[in-house]
Image (tube, helix red, strand yellow):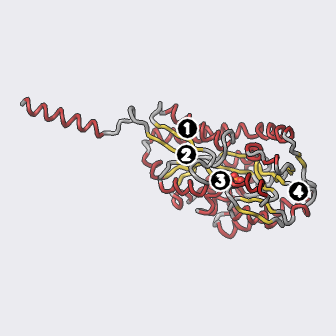
């Protein structure tokens, strides 16, 4: 009898040792991003991490790797799809997996930030994402606004003709390459992290970025002419690997979803204010801010809306998605 009790206790101890002990060992969640510290994408990732860790009382150790620390965007998206890391933040690079994702950044679509905010919290976001998860192995948890893109160039831009032939950096995304082509520019595709050295080396004449990027990388020091084209709102999202996500206990899954939504709302609130501060910083740093002429505004609308042809060719419900935006005006 005594021997049997000893055996049972030994088995019980062995069993305990092999059971997951969440209280003692934290579950590590790695999130990669491309933007430097202080930018909306990084702020959003860090807030998400904080909210998850607080709500789960430290069950998860959510580690944030901004500024392409885990590789450039294409590399870390692939790592997330393979489950090497659990999450990432990126933009419409995911359009190369599923073309509708590029529509998150359809040019000349929104009247202002509030309009986009309502669409991203509503039907438009859902329609764009329909089918993405099955195709990519990733789930899109939210939408962070990074700001409207504006041109930064070495030479001032006064008229549409000044844009012609300019070597402008573009993300390696068909939509961006098409937009540059429509304006007569020579689009130079390259990853975000390579832009400052390309400007330094003179291989590009400028590019287009939201104020958050223009300020963080001090683009205005080399390309001081900022033209307020505002042609496209940059939306980056938190993506999570489906295998990891679907294995989360339901209460934790809800915490991840709530944290993603809450962090996105925080970033939407910061967006308008951030633009005003950025303009002051650019001016202080020697940059100039110019309003585009009426002629240029018309050319931007045309070039932007002409890119929608790409969506009609590659996204079966493109028309429905574009139409859905109207209800949020
Ligand atoms: O969302 C994709 C695109 O906005 C990324 O642009 O300039 O950050 O590479 P960028």
Crowding at dot 3, Cα within 10 Å, few <14 / some 14-19 / many 20+, comes out as many
| Badge 2 density bin: few <14, some 14–19, many ≥20, Cα 10 Å | many
Q: Tag 3 or tag 4, which sits nearer the N-term?
A: 3
Label 4 packing within 10 angstroms: few (<14), some (14-19), many (20+): some
Identify the residue under disc 1.
49
Residues at marks 3 and 2 touching, judged by CB atoms closer than 8 Å:
no
On the image, the x and y values in percent for residue 227 come to 86, 51
How far, Cα to Cα, is label 1 from label 3? Answer: 19 Å
Name the residue beneath numbered marker 2. Answer: 31
Distance of label 3 from label 2 (alpha carbons): 14 Å
Instruction: From the image, tell me which residue sits under label 4.
Output: 297
Q: Earlier in the sequence, mark 1 or mark 3?
A: 1
Sequence-first tag of 2 and 4: 2
What is the tally of numbered marks visible in this picture?
4
- In what element is the residue under mark 3? loop
Q: Are marks 1 and 2 in contact (CB under 8 Å)?
A: yes
Left or right side of 7 for 279: right
Mark 1 CB within 8 Å of ligand 1: no
Q: Tell me the CA gap for discs 1 and 2.
A: 9 Å
């Amino acid at each position: 009898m005594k021997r049997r009790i000893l055996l049972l206790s030994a088995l019980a101890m062995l069993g305990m040792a092999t059971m997951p002990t969440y209280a003692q060992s934290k579950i590590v969640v790695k999130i990669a991003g491309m933007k430097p510290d202080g930018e909306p994408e990084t702020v959003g990732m860090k807030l998400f991490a904080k909210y998850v860790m607080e709500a789960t009382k430290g069950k998860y150790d959510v580690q944030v790797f901004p500024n392409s620390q885990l590789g450039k965007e294409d590399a870390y998206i692939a790592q997330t799809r393979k489950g090497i890391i659990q999450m990432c933040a990126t933009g419409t690079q995911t359009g190369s997996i599923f073309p509708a994702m590029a529509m998150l950044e359809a040019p000349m679509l929104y009247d202002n930030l509030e309009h986009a905010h309502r669409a991203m919290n509503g039907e438009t976001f859902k329609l764009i994402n329909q089918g993405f998860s099955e195709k990519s192995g990733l789930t899109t948890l939210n939408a962070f606004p990074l700001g409207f893109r504006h041109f930064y160039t070495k030479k001032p831009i006064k008229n549409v003709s000044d844009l012609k032939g300019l070597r402008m950096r573009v993300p390696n995304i068909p939509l961006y390459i098409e937009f540059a082509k429509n304006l007569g520019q020579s689009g130079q595709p390259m990853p975000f992290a390579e832009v400052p050295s390309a400007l330094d080396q003179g291989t590009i004449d400028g590019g287009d970025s939201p104020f958050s990027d223009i300020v963080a990388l001090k683009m205005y020091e080399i390309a001081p002419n900022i033209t307020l084209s505002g042609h496209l709102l940059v939306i980056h999202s938190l993506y999570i690997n489906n295998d990891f996500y679907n294995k989360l206990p339901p209460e934790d899954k809800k915490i991840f979803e709530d944290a993603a939504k809450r962090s996105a709302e925080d970033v939407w609130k910061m967006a308008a204010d951030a633009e005003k501060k950025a303009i002051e910083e650019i001016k202080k740093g020697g940059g100039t801010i110019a309003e585009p002429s009426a002629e240029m505004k018309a050319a931007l609308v045309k070039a932007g809306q002409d890119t929608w042809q790409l969506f009609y060719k590659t996204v079966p419900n493109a028309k429905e998605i574009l139409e859905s935006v109207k209800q949020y005006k």
